Image (tube, rainbow, N blue to C red):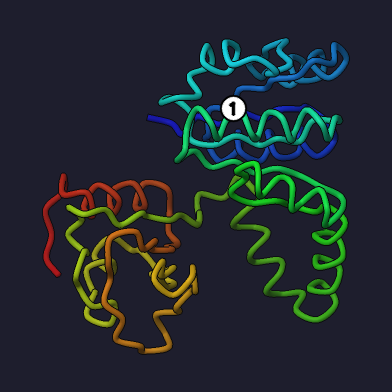
């Protein structure tokens, strides 16, 4: 089953996000209150909804409570983005909400409202230019993985209570090689979302709530995820 994502606002940024996710085989629902933006989205063959999302009924009709994996709030209205972030968090405490802001003050408001991540396009642009100047090859490799139709992808796996990796040690995990998966590391919740690279050799014990970050081809990623969830046989 495809991951289902809402892009709220088919703006210049929103259209790039939607097209990138579509290329990565996500099911993308485009929501906007601007007729011109909706026409552009339809022309790009997206499923569109002429909603403001300023009432809960519209959000619920889109399945925000249990059928959506994440939402990008990138409309042209900062007020709408803030209101939608607040409403979505109220309806679904676990949903990933990625919002956009241009100032630190806006970012703080969005985080307080419940945004999982706030992006500042100006900061991202500056960082991209810096990395292109200092590490052009690395930047190209990452861009090819993240933003092209390459079969290679980066993914993350949430460790739940029943995961076969729960209470295992990171250094001892070898099984990912059987799935042609590169295990980059783990995001540790107890250490304040600190990322631990596997190559560091730290013998970290994996706990519920940690997140594995992996790289591989889409089919291999899916098989490995099923294995971690206990639906595919293998050994550790």
Residue 40, given in percent of the width and then of the height, sits at 82, 19
Report the residue at 61% width, 22% height from top.
29
- The reply, left or right, for residue 137 in relation to residue 189 is right
Q: Quadrant of residue 138?
A: bottom right
Instruction: Compare residues 99 and 121 and report the one nearer the observer.
Output: 99
- The reply, left or right, for residue 216 in relation to residue 59 is left
Q: Quadrant of residue 72?
A: top right
Image quarter (top left, top right, bottom left or bottom right) of the N terminus: top left
Report the residue at 22% width, 80% height from top.
172
Report the residue at 36% width, 89% height from top.
201
Answer above or below: position of 212 versus 118.
below
Instruction: Compare residues 218 and 186 and report the one nearer the observer.
Output: 186
Residue 106, given in percent of the width and then of the height, sits at 81, 48
Residue underneath mark 1? 28
- The reply, left or right, for residue 162 in relation to residue 114 is left
- The reply, left or right, for residue 125 in relation to residue 45 is right
Helix, strand or loop status at disc 1: strand
Image quarter (top left, top right, bottom left or bottom right) of the C terminus: bottom left
Answer above or below: position of 216 versus 194.
above
Instruction: Compare residues 72 and 58 and report the one nearer the observer.
Output: 58
Answer above or below: position of 5 versus 148.
above
Residue 2, given in percent of the width and then of the height, sits at 43, 31
Report the residue at 77% width, 74% height from top.
136
List the single residue furthest toward the bottom: 201
Residue 230, given in percent of the width and then of the height, sits at 16, 49
């Amino acid at each position: 089953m495809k991951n289902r994502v809402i892009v709220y606002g088919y703006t210049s940024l929103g259209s790039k996000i939607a097209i990138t996710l579509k290329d990565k085989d996500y099911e993308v629902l485009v929501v906007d209150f601007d007729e011109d933006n909706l026409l552009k989205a339809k022309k790009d063959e997206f499923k569109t909804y002429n909603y403001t999302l300023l009432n809960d009924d519209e959000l619920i009709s889109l399945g925000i409570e249990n059928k959506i994996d994440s939402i990008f709030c990138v409309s042209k209205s900062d007020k709408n983005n803030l209101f939608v972030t607040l409403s979505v968090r109220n309806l679904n405490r676990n949903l990933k909400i990625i919002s956009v802001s241009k100032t630190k003050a806006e970012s703080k408001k969005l985080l307080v409202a419940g945004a999982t991540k706030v992006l500042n396009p100006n900061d991202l642009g500056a960082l991209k230019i810096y990395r292109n100047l200092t590490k052009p090859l690395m930047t190209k490799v990452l861009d090819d993985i993240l933003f092209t139709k390459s079969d290679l992808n980066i993914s993350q796996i949430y460790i739940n209570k029943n995961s076969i990796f729960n209470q295992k040690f990171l250094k001892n995990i070898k099984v990912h090689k059987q799935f042609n998966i590169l295990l980059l590391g783990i995001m540790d919740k107890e250490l304040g979302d600190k990322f631990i690279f596997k190559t560091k050799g730290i013998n970290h014990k994996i706990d519920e709530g940690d997140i594995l970050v992996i790289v591989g081809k889409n089919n291999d990623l899916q098989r490995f995820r099923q294995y971690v969830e206990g639906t595919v046989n293998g050994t550790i």
